[in-house]
Image (tube, rainbow, N blue to C red):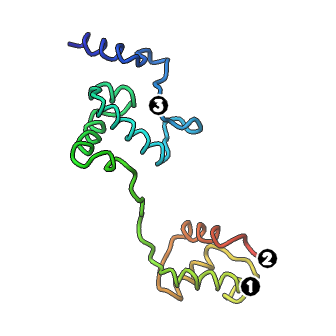
Amino acid sequence: MLEKRVTDVQDTELPTDPSRPLKSSQSAGCEGTLSRDEMEHRRLEAAEDFLHGFSHSYVVAKFGVSRTTASRWRRALRAKGPESLRKGKASGRPSRLTPEQKAQIADVFDQGALAAGSSDNRWTATLLAKVIEERFSVHYSLEHVGRLLAKLGPTRN
């Protein structure tokens, strides 16, 4: 039985030598990490293979995915069609601030750190976190507030 499986893989012209990489949609810049677009492309390509009658083992070997992943793709394809394999919106955790509150933070930032109570006109994550907590009763980590600062613009002197 194992011999048959090896033959199946060899018949598909997939490399059986570990030193030869599989032809896949992997990003050249970051080996092993695919963007969301590349993952979608890979799923749709696998769907085409399933629709053209290629075996489950073939898809597993071709794309270097687990049998569970290939089974999930095939189940979704059968149940809802190829559109089910398209990427969805990656919403993430909802913001604790409303868009209006974010606009207010940008206005405070534009007024400068002196107006917010700083001894110099230099924004820090600590100062912005304090302003956010005082105005909106929302506590953010300094790491997150640092990302907000980066979005607002360069530190002002």
First in residue order: circle 2 vs circle 3:
3
Q: Is residue 93 above or below residue 49?
A: below
Binning the other alpha carbons within 10 Å of mark 3 as few (below 14), some (14 to 19) or many (20 upward) gives: few
**N-terminal of the two: label 3 or label 1?**
3
In front of the other: 47 or 111: 47
Identify the amino acid type marked 1: Ser
- The answer to whether the residues at label 2 and label 3 have Cβ atoms under 8 Å apart is no
Please provide percent x and percent y for residue 129: 57, 78
* Position of residue 35 measured from the top left corner of the image (x, y, whole percent): 50, 46
The numbered dot on residue 119 is 1
Q: Residue furthest front?
A: 52
In front of the other: 57 or 78 = 78
Residue at image location 33% in from the left, 29% down from the top: 60
- For label 2, count other residues whose C-alpha is less than 10 Å away and answer few (under 14), some (14-19) or many (20+): few
Taking the spot 28% from the left edge, 25% from the top edge, the residue there is: 57
Q: Residue at x 54, y 38 (%)?
A: 27
Q: Nearer the viewer, mark 3 or mark 1?
A: 3
The secondary element bearing badge 1 is classed as loop
Amino acid bearing label 3: Ser
Lower position in the chain sequence, tag 2 or tag 1: 1
Q: Please, is residue 156 above or below residue 42 in the view?
A: below
Coordinates of residue 4 in the picture (x, y in percent): 25, 12
**In the rendering, which numbered label is found on residue 157?**
2
Q: CA distance from mark 3 to mark 1?
A: 56 Å
Q: Amino acid at mark 2?
A: Asn
Q: Is residue 43 left or right of residue 157?
A: left
Tag shown at residue 24 = 3
- Structural distance between the alpha carbons of marks 2 and 3: 49 Å
Residue placed at 66% from the left, 87% from the top?
A: 116
Q: Are marks 2 and 1 in contact (CB under 8 Å)?
A: no
